Image (tube, coloured by chain):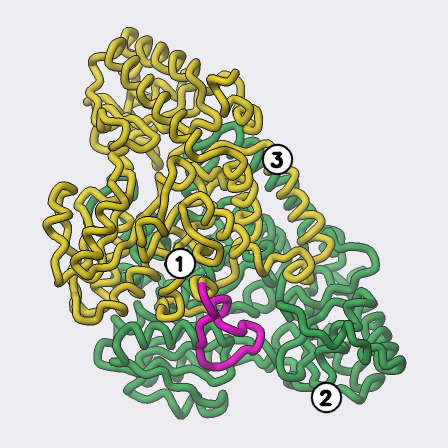
Chain colours: A green, B yellow
Amino acid sequence: LSSDPLARFRDRFALPDGVIYLDGNSLGALPKSTPARIAEVIEREWGRDLITSWNKHGWIDLSQRVGDKIARLVGAGPGEVMVADSTSVNLFKLLAAALRLRPGRCILLSERGNFPTDLYVAEGLVELLGQSHELRLVEPEEIPGAIDDGVAVVFLTQVDYRTGRLHDLAEITARAHQAGALMLWDLAHSAGALPVDLRGAGAEFAVGCGYKYLNGGPGAPAFLYLRGDLQESIKTPLTGWLGHAAPFAFETAYRPAPGIGRGRVGTPPILSLAALEIGVDLMLEADMAEIRRASIALTEQVIAAVETRCPELRLVSPRDPARRGSQVSFAHPEGYAIVQALIARGVIGDFRAPDILRFGIAPLYVRPKDIDAAVAHLRAVLDGREWDRPEFRTHAAVT
Amino acid sequence: LSSDPLARFRDRFALPDGVIYLDGNSLGALPKSTPARIAEVIEREWGRDLITSWNKHGWIDLSQRVGDKIARLVGAGPGEVMVADSTSVNLFKLLAAALRLRPGRCILLSERGNFPTDLYVAEGLVELLGQSHELRLVEPEEIPGAIDDGVAVVFLTQVDYRTGRLHDLAEITARAHQAGALMLWDLAHSAGALPVDLRGAGAEFAVGCGYKYLNGGPGAPAFLYLRGDLQESIKTPLTGWLGHAAPFAFETAYRPAPGIGRGRVGTPPILSLAALEIGVDLMLEADMAEIRRASIALTEQVIAAVETRCPELRLVSPRDPARRGSQVSFAHPEGYAIVQALIARGVIGDFRAPDILRFGIAPLYVRPKDIDAAVAHLRAVLDGREWDRPEFRTHAAVT
C-alpha cells in the first residue's frame, strides 16, 4: 500500500468497468463528485436562486477562485491565475499584451512543432497587426540560439503533444530573459501532470487547459497566468465587461480591473466552470511530487513493456524521464488503425498524425496493472492483425 | 385557454414557488428537462464514453447544430450561425473581419449608450490596430446621419439594455448599405424575445447571447452570424484549431474551415453548450410571432398598471410597443433599493445604474397574473418605504 500512495484516488473517478483509460491528456476522467455538484448548480443555484446566484452563490468570483486553486498547481501565487475562455483565446490576449511590453521588438518565436492552435493564434495576431511583426518558427534545439534582441516573446508548449518531450521551463525562461525577451508557456499537458514553478522561473505569462489532467470535463474553460508585478502595466486587446474595473457601473470607456481581473472578457460558462473546480479540488488533495514519481514509474513501465513485447512500435518519446511529460508515444505505419483496434478492446489511447500512438498517463487513475493489461491487448492486436479491418481504417471526425 | 396559447410552456420551466421572475433578460429560467440532459452528458457521455464522445455523441458538431437551431430564431439559414465563446469575443472577431472587408474606411460607428462591453471590445480592437481606426459614438437619433463613406461598420445592439428601446433593424441596415458600410447587430436582448430577420435585412454580421431569452443557463456560450455569401471571404483574427479546415491534421499554417466553421476558435464548453441546446429546443417549439404578441400584451400591462398604481416611477421605455423590446424600465432615485426590496418579496427584476428598475418579460413563463402580483408588491414596497432599510441600500458585487 505504501508503495502506491495514489491508489486511494483511483476510486474517486467514475471509470467504466473494462476500460483502461490512457487518454487523460485529451479528456480527463469524470470525478465521482462532479454529477452531484453540477446537479446542485443547475437545480438549486440556477433553478431556484436564479439571477441572485451571481452574488448568493459566488458565481461572480468563481473564475478567480478556481484560478487561485490552479495557481497552487503551477507555482503561481493567489491573484496570478484566472480561469477564462479557451486556451487559444487566452494565448491571443497574452501574446498581444507581450508585444505591447516590447514595442521595439518584432519577433514572436516558437517551435515549428508547437501545438498548431498556438501557431494559428500567433499567425492571426501577426496578420491583424498588418505584418509589422514576424512569427519565427525553429526546431526545438535551435530555440536557445534563436532568442536574440529582436525577439519580443518566446512562446512554447512545455510538453510536446505528440512525443511528450519536456522543455526545461526554468532554463529557457532564463535564456529569454537574458536576451530581454518575454516568456509565455502553454501548460496544456503540464498542469496537473507534473510540478511546474512559474514564479520560480520568473515567467511572465502562461496559459493552460482545464479538460486534460485537471479533469474539468469536455471543453472546460482554460486559464491564464499573468505574473503579479506586471499586471498593472498590461492591457489585453480583448477588453470585455467582466475585465472592467467596475462592470456594473456600465461606463462608456474601458478601465481594466485591478490585477488578474483584467484577464476576463465575457460571462464565464458557469456549469463548465463549476465542473472544473471539482477536478481541480481533487487534484489539490494529491501531492504533485508524488504524482510525478508515479508518472515516471508508469511511463518507464510502458516503455519497457512495449519495447520488450511489441518491438514493431518505435518509441518517439524521450527515453530520459527527466525530459518526458506524463505520456508515452510510439510510431507505427498503421498507428491509426491500431489505436482503433485497441479502443474496441477497451484500451483508450489516441492517435496523432501522421503515425503516432499516444498513451497518456494520469497517475490519479492509471495503475501499474492497467499498463500490463494494455500492453497485452496491444500484443494481441498486433498478433491478430486486428487493425487490418475496414472499420478501423476509416478516419473519424475527431482522431 | 385560446387567449393564452403560450400557457402550456410555463410548466416546462422549474420556477420556484412564490417567485415572480422578471429577469429572464439577464438569466433565463431553468427548463425542467435540462437537469436530466446534463446528467446524461456528464455520466453517460463524459463518464462512460470518455474521449470517444467527440465522435460517438457528436460533441464535435454540437456548436454547429445548436447554431443551426438558433438560426431559425433570428432569420438566418443553416450554416450561417455558430455557437462559440462569449458575445464579447465574437464581437471582436466580427468587427475585425468587417474592417478587413472595408480597407479604405476607418470608422467603427455605434451609439454612446450601446451595451458597454460592445464599446470596450471596439475600443480594444482600435487600440490594438494602433489607432489607424476610430470608434465614433453618437446618440441613437444621430445614427442615420452619421453613416457616411468613412464608416466601415455600424454596430448596434437592437434592444437597448436599459430602456428596451428597439432599433429598426431593416431600416438601419439599409441605411448602412446605402453608404457602403457593413452592419453588425448585437441580438443579446432580441434572440428568443422577438422576431428577427437577419437575412431579410441583408445584415452581414450578428452576435448574441445564450443565457438570456434562450434559457441556456448561466454564462451559456454565445453565437455569431456570418451572412452566407460573405463567409469564404472572411477570416477572423482569432484563428484557433477548431476553426481550421482540418483540425486533426495538425498542420503548421492556418487554413480557415469552409463556411461558418471558421467562426470557432477553441474547444467549446460541452456541459454549458448542451444546456443551451435544451433552452433553444424549447424556444423552437413556440411560435415567435405568438411570443411577440404575448410580450407586447404583457409589457403594455406592466406600463398601464405601474403608471396607474405607482406614479412615483417614471417610464423610460418607449411607449410605442413597436419601438420596444420585451422589457419595461422605469426610473426612480431609489431604484436600487426598491429592486432589492422587491427581490426580498420574491419579485425578481434588476437594476441598472444610475436609477433604472428593469423588468424583463419572457412570455414563455411570465403570465398576466404575475404582472398584477408584481405591481401589487411594488405598491406595497413604496407604501411601506421598505426600500429604506440598510440591507437594501448596500450594493452587491452584481447588480
| Residue linked to disc 1 | A80
Of residues B127 and A154, the one nearer the viewer is B127
Q: Chain of mark 1?
A: A
* Residue B250 among magenta residues: yes
Res. A45 in view = no
Hey, what amino acid is under mark 3? Ser
Judged from the image, the secondary structure of the residue bearing numbered disc 1 is: loop
Hey, what amino acid is under mark 2? Arg
Do labels 2 and 1 touch, CB within 8 Å? Answer: no
| Residue linked to disc 3 | B33
Res. B353 in view = yes
Q: Which quarter of the figure is the C terminus of chain B placed in?
A: top left
Q: Residue at x 43, y 32 (%)?
A: A51
Judged from the image, the secondary structure of the residue bearing numbered disc 3 is: loop
Number of the front mark, 1 or 3? 3
Mark sitting on residue A314: 2
Q: Using the image, determine if residue A72 lies above or below residue B218.
A: below
Hey, what amino acid is under mark 1? Glu
Q: Which residues are magenta?
A: B241-259
